[in-house]
Amino acid sequence: MQFSAFNLLRNAVSGHRHWQPMWREPEPNSSYDVLIIGGGGHGLATAYYLAKEFGIHNIAVLEKGWIGSGNVGRNTTIIRSNYMLHDNIRFYERAMRMWEDQEQVLNYNTMVSQRGVLNLFHSDPQRHAFARRGNAMRINGVDAELLDKEGVRRLVPYLNFDNARFPILGGLLQRRGGTVRHDAVAWGYGRAADQEGAHLVQRCEVTGLRISNNKVMGVETTRGYIGAEKVGVAVAGSSSLLANMAGLRLPIESHVLQAFVTEGLKPVLNTVVTYGAGHFYVSQSDKGGLVFGGDLDGYNSYAQRGNLATVEDVCEGAMSMMPRIGKAKILRHWGGIMDMSMDGSPIIDKTSVDGLYLNAGWCYGGFKATPASGFCFAHLIAKDEPHPDAAAFRLDRFGRGAVIDEKGQGPQPNLH
Amino acid sequence: MIIPCPYCGRRHSSEFSYLGDASLMRRPDFEASEEMWSDYIYLRDNRAGNHKELWRHSFGCGAWLIVERNTVTHDVLSVVPAKDQS
Amino acid sequence: MQVRRCPAGGLIDRASPVRFSFDGKEYEGFRGDTLASALLANGINLMGRSFKYHRPRGVFTADSSEPNALMEIGSGAHRDPNVKATMEELVDGLEARSQNRWPSLAFDVMAVNGLLSPIFTAGFYYKTFMWPKSFWEKVYEPVIRRAAGLGRLSDEPDPRTYERRHIHCDILVVGAGPAGLAAALLGARSGARVVLADEDFHLGGSLLNLRNYKQTEEGAWADAAIAELNNTPKVTVLPKTAVFGLYDGPVFAALQRPQAASKNPVTFYWKIFPKQTILATGASERGVVFGGNDKPGVMLASAAQTYVNRFATKPGRRSVVFTSTDDGWYSAAALEKAGILVAAVVDPREGLSPALTGTVDAECFQGAVVEKARGGRHLQDAIITAENGKKTTVQCDLLAVSGGWSPNIGLTCHLGAKPSWDSARSAFMPAKLPGGIAYAGALEGSVSTGTALKSGLEAAQKALDLLEMHSAEIKIPTAEKNLNISRSADMPLWRVRSAKEKAFVDLQHDVVATDISQANREGFRSVEHVKRYTTLGMATDQGRTSNLNGLAILADENNMPMSSIGLTTYRPPYVPVAVGAFAGENAGLDFRPKRLPPSHRWAERQGAVFVEAGDWLRAQYFPKTEEKHWRQSVDREVTAVRTKVGFSDVSTLGKIDIFGPDASVLLERVYINAWRKLAVGKARYGLMLRDDGFAMDDGTTARMAEDHYVMTTTTAKAGPVFQHLKFCHECLWSDLNVAFVSSTDQWAQYALAGPKSRDVLQRLTDHDVSNEALPYMGATAASILGVEGRIFRLSFSGELAYEIAVPARYGEEFAEAIMDAGAAEGIEPYGTEALGVLRIEKGHLAGPELNGQTTAQDLGMGRMMSKKKDFIGRKMALRSYLNAPDRASLVGIRASDPSISFEAGVHLFAPDAPVDPAHDLGYVTSAVFSPTVDATIGLGFLSHAEEYSGRLLRAVDPLRGTNVSVEVCSPHFVDPDGERLRA
Amino acid sequence: MPSLVAHPIVEDPVYPIVDETFAYWMSKGGDTLKLRKAVEGSCGFVLPGPGACIALSEKEQAVWAAPDQWFVMGVNPPASLASHIHFAEQSDGRVVFSLPDLEGRDLLAAGCSVDLHPEAFLPGMAATSKINHFTALFWQPTLEPKRINVAVFRSYAQSFNSWLGDRRRSQQQI
Ligand SMILES: Cc1cc2nc3c(=O)[nH]c(=O)nc-3n(C[C@H](O)[C@H](O)[C@H](O)COP(=O)(O)OP(=O)(O)OC[C@H]3O[C@@H](n4cnc5c(N)ncnc54)[C@H](O)[C@@H]3O)c2cc1C
Ligand SMILES: NC(=O)c1ccc[n+]([C@@H]2O[C@H](COP(=O)([O-])OP(=O)(O)OC[C@H]3O[C@@H](n4cnc5c(N)ncnc54)[C@H](O)[C@@H]3O)[C@@H](O)[C@H]2O)c1
Ligand SMILES: Cc1cc2nc3c(=O)[nH]c(=O)nc-3n(C[C@H](O)[C@H](O)[C@H](O)COP(=O)(O)O)c2cc1C
Ligand SMILES: [Zn+2]
């Protein structure tokens, strides 16, 4: 059923008894042309674009829990394309442009809110690095502004300008950046993929890959064996586990990142702000909660929960950047398992196994990539060649030294 | 998490720095192939379950330690000084 | 006038009246009241408005699970939003305001949302607001945002004092009800270190709800126990302390609200490290979902009982009790004894024992339910439906509801354990936890006071056994005697189906029963999906009174048993915790400690301007009164060094002492160049790589003795390099006989630079510092002004220069002495700014170039890489991709004309090339105005550097709107042949 | 030539600062046993094991700091030890505050997760840990009256002193 204000009214009159399920709950077929493992944002988007853009409709998304139970449903919802390296800018800007049309394309209000993303800087070297980055964005036709302290004050007046250990000198602002309602992205793509014929198979965990003569045949799951011509892996924090099923090791470690939400408050913050002297970034959700996060907990983990030391570190940053936040009360905090790659940039590539494709390494920044990731991954699977905008995200770049290392931290994932 | 440092006793994990998989101790020889090298530098088992990894008690005695820890439950199973194993 | 206060009884201190205000009106309550009980005593039941429909709401509970009575407390900087009136201890001058209403609580225009409620159902916003596209940010979102949210955050910085405490103990007891008290007391008597925490300001838990608590045996026992615990030195009693999280370790986190009486209220954040833990967090009563169940006057039966017994306050005059448990009957009896008319008791169960029904003198409806509650801002009546469909309307202003009990399992789930459904108890029971964590009291199913007491003792005994401590004897009350009625089974009652009126599941978020059905119909079947689609349980109370009802409705819709429907995930914190509490003292200027170099106080006296460099505070420049712009000061400082002499505190550079016969071998392996042959008394520049072949850090290392080197690192990398060296030793080559000590703090090390530096230096030491005795890159111990110090002939500026080290305690005085010694030469101190200009003029690298993305080759040091040895990073640095000719490498950039300038961060393009990514040739990492060159100069990375050498490029800076012509040159702008530094 | 004068690092110390020499002693080649014997022979005390300290007097103390590394206060290493130890002068690298016993434990517990209860952290014990954001080595000498010595990096001493002062102030106000 098409979503619109009119339809909403019509259903209101009938007590909302006529809404259809947003997606079917099919029993899996015995085989598909393409199987996507992972019902997160990327997996669902991939399924949608495979069908919609590349005409492959005999597909299924296999999700071990419920769709959106992974990182797409637990992230801090920030979208931006404010990168420094051209390969990243190009790709994330594609995503940004897709976000800008997303609601109309999906007929689903994912609440894309371009309220601006502001990264603060507190020293000259930081200013210079941001200048290099902002200029790279502008060279790519992406919007970026370098604000001085007064510019920042005009935008977000109640930051700590006067009593700070690390004074705010200015900020890099991307006005087109912002937030998107996380769950709605999963549901919007899920519903759209379902409408295009894809099967969303929930509570279906992939436990093994069947490979013969270095060609993928299908997958073992908790709901039985399912055959496939091609298998796309989009399981974020579980990427290494899936790769292990094919005997592969990845340039990835799984780490936990925490997120926090406060009680609902009347509007206090209109922009996404990132602290440059500590680990803290924050935005306010439409419901009124301040949604924020900080650094990784720092050690390999497959447990979706965080450590107290990181909670303190994040809140120290919060208080130092925005002293009025002190009395906002944290309502809940949780963790997600991130596929941290060795250079902090993603991988969208074929693997050494025929028919097995990999979408991984999204670190803490893959939510904003969702539309472009889905589109480019679908392109790769359908055409067996990378989409130009994602062509740099190859697996062999590490060995070659063609790393895409925004932060210059080298192969230590917990530092990216 | 509490990590029992063989020297200092039970300490909170926030006193330690993390490096990663203990396989980083097996640095290849210069003569080894570039492929072996890039495996060493970039690839990880990244296990869900028991995992041997390098931590340094950087706010304590400063020693590098090999910690065996479960990455699913966060249980710490054993801790030994790295220098005894290298 | 406290119109609803009972004439006697209660745990309030009638001799201590307390004045407070609510929505601007003054009221009086007593010490021992909560804000909620005092408001009720004053006849105020309307305490808030709901989130979405702005429905009038009264207080629903008497504990921290309160969904409705959330208020703003205090004003100005102290304004605290979303405070639960049920937990706020009444203090003199307390200023409370209702929230999320306009213009007033009684009349809220946003209540029109209620009319739109047919549209505002679960997830309606996902289906609309999409057209026109530009309207979301401009129209819809602002309107939604303004309407959403509850309280208002103060616009001023949080002025509260937060303190952090770590505490270890043998036994942590969470909850001070009968179970917790018994456990803590046994632990205390047995000599264990005990921590007992309870979130209430009055310990006692459910016992406090007893009528005439002080006169009961249990009450007397509890008071004695509390007194004894307070007087046992090894016991820490933490009232007003919610244990809000269980983290790996186990480490428990707790928040202690300020003590009411204290003049300087401090909020404590506790981190508790127990050997054994006993959770005795009790159980919470649940409501029932029926039409109009949100009217002010509908509350939990146990809460009503608490208000009359503990607070001697009548939450109503005429009540109906709707219960599916025996406890509701006892609550009814309590109301009656307090003088509230109990018009009816409604129980869906049948065949109740006369002994139970006889506890109250009220009309009794067995096998019946309350189908609907009616009223506006106040409850007016309840419509009771009997099994045969017969309806009875009973007038009431209080409807006390008991739909069953849920153990408070929150904490037990924080480490990921999943509770399981116990159908006998109709409750989710906690999973077993490792790490010495045990349960007692209602949490583990001991629901009567007697069994709770006993289970507390047993848990403590077990804990003591595990601690290998001898357990003492204690006596507990016989309790059960007043309960001569055997308990009939609770009937889990989740909702009354026949309801047509809005029946609320989640009171705070206005989630109604039909929202759950609709979500289910739309395909949201998992409990987690339903939660997210309807926002059930996502409010400040985290659904403590509502989640289970919602899940039960979902189970019912799908004909599934509760056991397979599951529960949504519990997460910390158990109660909301202020961000400020986690930060403690580490905020504002104290966010991070300050590191001060030895000359700091001296520099302060010179009027230096300081700049943060990591934790360090360094002198940035030393302005003179006549100088109006920082550039004037910096130019002067630079010129002083180039023409005369200057000095600068470089103590922040990392210094690592490396000892041992194998020190040279280690250096060979961590630096790209050769070290074995470095003579004692000599220093050498070195570059170290990461093992992936990219540069990590650089610096000079001096050989002070055969087996002793002093390594210098950049300021920022001191810690990482030290750690790296330890890694190399302990993890890679533990056979090497070396040892490291960080000695950064030991030395005040000052650079003395400029053509006159030798003359000045000679005045500071008797040591021969002639060019012959101490040539470039010489290093020696020397007596400096009578103290044992060191002299290194190093130059970051490119001038004849020295670094002189004296023990740090002399640093302040030494700065003075250098100034005196150089007075004749016109010596000037210089700061980090001039240091930066000087090093860029000389083409020396710093952080912006050593940015982790560059290789030795990129940095122009490819040839320095030894071919004779393995070293960290060598193999990977040799990869062909990293040595391709188009890879950007270090160049100098200068403005083609002194009148133009550019800044770090510009990108470089060929003059005629379009400004697009394909034509981006590189970027500038460092740029300054050089008074020496008399132009803006910089360092940067450029592809095809050789080809462009000497040619003009465009420095493009769209951010700042400039695009200027620059020349590519050598990065060594000053004295490229190094004659000056060898002079 | 004039002689340099030392300035106190902390202008307004909340607690007394120990005016002594400090150094790290490290065993050459990691032979701890040999070193211990040599030290016992020439200095008359046994270097303490992990987590321990010894106090010959108010002035002379030795604290275990790290594997094969001791923080030694007030003892000049005799020349005979030169073949057994590397000796790193730290008299100016560390600042040692001397805190009164119980009050000191309370203050440190505000920032330190080591168990500082008098029954857990006993005279003769030592630990290196984090105190809020400071790295510190602290120990309780086996002397009366009991005190806790806390060594921090010199450049952090002023900041650490303010931290102690702030904690003490809020402690007193409660
Ligand atoms: C706390 C936090 C904050 C973040 N903040 C941001 C942010 O602000 N901006 C941003 O851009 N990014 C952010 N991210 C990162 C972003 O959420 C992720 O990069 C992105 O969601 C990953 O892609 P996905 O949505 O496909 O992953 P997921 O949603 O994790 O999807 C993977 C799915 O695979 C399923 N799966 C795993 N194994 C199997 C199996 N064997 N069989 C079947 N299914 C399986 C999982 O259950 C899961 O549903 C954040 C992440 C976290 C955790
Ligand atoms: N069905 C039932 O479970 C039921 C029904 C009616 C009465 N009761 C009564 O409940 C009592 C059970 O005794 P009990 O000791 O197990 O529970 P209790 O309810 O008496 O005490 C629990 C205490 O734990 C505290 N608490 C809960 N979570 C906390 C947290 N996270 N941090 C700090 N404090 C926390 C509460 O403030 C409360 O004081 C008996 O007196 C029994 O009669 C139980
Ligand atoms: C952007 C965002 C906003 C959230 N807001 C709330 C909220 O207002 N209330 C709430 O209880 N949880 C909120 N959550 C957290 C979820 O309840 C949940 O904890 C999170 O999605 C992780 O799932 P899990 O805790 O079930 O593992 C929010 C999550 C996100 C990502
Ligand atoms: Zn240790």
Image (cartoon, helix red, strand yellow):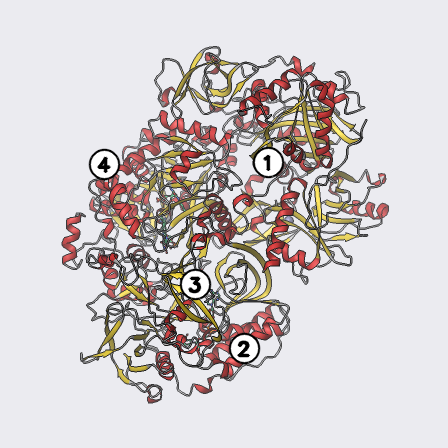
Question: From the viewer's perspective, is C414 left or right of C118?
Answer: right
Q: Position of residue C847 (x, y in %)?
A: 54, 29
Residue C795 x %, y %: 65, 21
Q: Name the element at disc 4.
A: loop
Residue type at tag 4: Glu
Mark 4 touches mark 3? (CB < 8 Å): no
Q: Position of residue C944 (x, y in %)?
A: 45, 16
Looking at the picture, does residue C105 appear above or below residue C939? below
Q: Residues within 10 Å of mark 1 (few under 14, many from 20)?
A: some
The image quarter in which residue C116 lies: bottom left
- The residue where tag 3 is placed is C410
In the rendered structure, the residue with mark 1 lies on which chain?
C
- Can I make out residue A171 in this image? no
x%, y% of residue A157? Answer: 41, 41
Tell me the CA gap for discs 2 and 4.
73 Å
Q: Which mark is residue C223?
A: 2
Spatial distance from mark 1 to mark 2, Cα to Cα?
A: 55 Å
Q: Which mark is residue A53?
A: 4
The disc at residue C617 is: 1
Ranked by sequence position, the earlier of labels 1 and 2 is 2
Label 3 residue near ligand 2, CB within 8 Å = yes
- Whichever of labels 3 and 1 marks the residue nearer the N terminus, that label is 3
Q: Chain of mark 3?
A: C
- Same chain? Circles 1 and 2: yes
Q: Secondary structure at mark 2?
A: helix
Which mark is first along the chain, 2 or 3?
A: 2
| Rendered view: C437 above or below C869 | below
